[in-house]
Image (cartoon, helix red, strand yellow):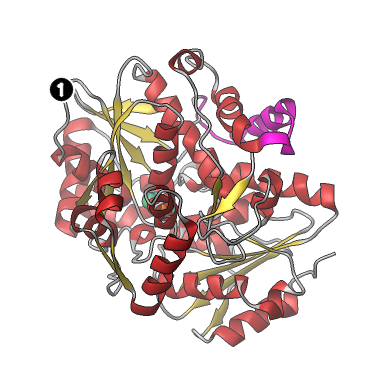
Amino acid sequence: MDYVSTRGMAVPLDFEGVTLAGLAADGGLYVPREWPRFTEAEIAALTGLPYARLAARIMLPFVGDSLSEARLLDMCETAYGRFTHAAVTPLVQLDKRNWLLELFHGPTLAFKDVALQLLGLLFEEFLTRCDENLTIVGATSGDTGSAAIDAVAGRERVDIFMLHPKGRVSDVQRRQMTTVKAPNVYNIAIEGSFDDAQRHVKRMFADEGLTGRFRMGAVNSINWARLMAQVVYYFAAALQLGAPHRKVAFSVPTGNFGDVFAGYVAAQMGLPIERLVVATNVNDILHRALSQGDYSAGEVTPTAAPSMDIQVSSNFERLLFDCSGRDGAAVAAQMRGFDDTRAMRLTDGQREGMAGLFTSARTDPDEMALAMRWAWEECGQAIDPHTAIGLHAARRIELAGGVPLVTLATAHPAKFHDPVERATGFRPNLPDRVGDLFQREEACAELSGDYDAIAAYVAERAAPAA
Ligand SMILES: *Cc1c(COP(=O)(O)O)cnc(C)c1O
């Protein structure tokens, strides 16, 4: 399998290459040249596999010659062995139609662990193979940072520089990053929003002063391997609910469009997905894009669901590419226009291509609180604010009778205990696996929003490319 850029100009790479790459050199994102497809019989044969085995089967076509099946399985067993639930991503039924897919049983309590635990192992494997050092720069609205740091802390050949918007992540999220003591981990709090942090990171990938000296890698969902690992739990959930003989719908709390894009990939691979609900909070650029064709960035409004406080969703470009006849030049022109004006109109063709599978809904803070209260009072489930946004969208959407609707539970409620307690009166406890988080010392650099200072901070500390 090789991978092409959504902007059509970068050289294609194999799986090892895209795993170690950040953005493509032309500013685009890598996608597989074509979607591997399973027949109905092949999907049926996946029923009942343990999670790690299922993961290896789903991912093998994407990995191509970069890993043997045995090595891939071995890595999946290591990565998913760190999850505290035997099912890795268990399903919980809420009512006749609604289910929760709990993705938060990993080390840092959010779904990001599912992909990043594996990505940490992939980095190690491929860097050892080519005797190389990797400088990871990332921006986080909270959960990617902690999951990525947990996945690479203490690993040789990797330095990680994680930018988060100062004061805009929860105390649990911040401490999960800043209390990790490892010589290869650098936390940077910057003035501004997540989008500002993400802009700095994108600029670093294009900065020849850095790319000439360091091998720059990404842990954000621009990294293809992350999306690939997330495809697996769509299969896991749908198989349990009767796929391939029954259709299943998903509601996905969405920020950077990575998680829901993985659902789109599952559908391209043959999984019978009836609908993907893109659930946004009041930072609703994706809802406006999907419902009105208007992809225009506004100001970010901070909410109790910070991982969705995003106006520019990187992975949307991957969907645009697929819904534009995979015409990289057209996507490049459209994205250049967006970069100049922070706004673009989707073409009719793009809108039609998306409408076949995607629906969207926007949830305001009151509705989010109501969804937390409903889950707690009617179903006995404490859910986090992000999950609540997905559940609110799920409860409003109409579907053909009998189609089960799975809301992705993207974070553990204890990770956001304050808003959960405000909505329900119940304060969820942190699970034992996070240990004495509030007793540990924090370490974090504070930098202004000045790009040059951030780039210099990285350049002074990272290990140069071999
Ligand atoms: C990252 C995150 C999201 C958004 O996922 P995307 O892949 O960026 O769309 C939603 N909920 C939680 C808890 C997250 O950490």
Apparent side of residue 350 relative to residue 193 in the rendered image (left or right) = left
The answer to whether residue 191 is above or below residue 267 is below
Which residue is rendered at x = 71% and y = 29% of the image? Answer: 74
- Front in this rendered view, residue 309 or 416: 309
Residue 196 rendering spot, x and y as whole percentages? 44, 75
Q: Residues within 10 Å of mark 1 (few under 14, many from 20)?
A: few
Apparent side of residue 432 relative to residue 388 in the rendered image (left or right) = right
Say which residue label 1 marks: 401
Apparent side of residue 194 relative to residue 363 in the rendered image (left or right) = right
Residue 134 rendering spot, x and y as whole percentages? 73, 61
Apparent side of residue 127 relative to residue 162 in the rendered image (left or right) = right
In magenta stretch: residue 222: no
Residue 167 in view: no
- Front in this rendered view, residue 66 or 365: 66
Residue 136 in view: yes
Q: Quadrant of the N terminus?
A: top right
Q: Determine the main secondary structure of the stretch shown in magenta.
A: helix
Q: Which residues lie in the magenta part?
A: 64-86
Residue 325 rendering spot, x and y as whole percentages? 41, 48
Q: Secondary structure at mark 1?
A: loop
Q: Quadrant of the C terminus?
A: bottom right
The answer to whether residue 415 is above or below residue 234 is below
Residue 342 rendering spot, x and y as whole percentages? 34, 74
Give the total number of marks visible in the rendering.
1
- Front in this rendered view, residue 189 or 290: 290
Q: Amino acid at mark 1?
A: Gly
Which residue is rendered at x = 78% and y = 52% of the image? Answer: 127
In magenta stretch: residue 79: yes
The answer to whether residue 135 is above or below residue 101 is below
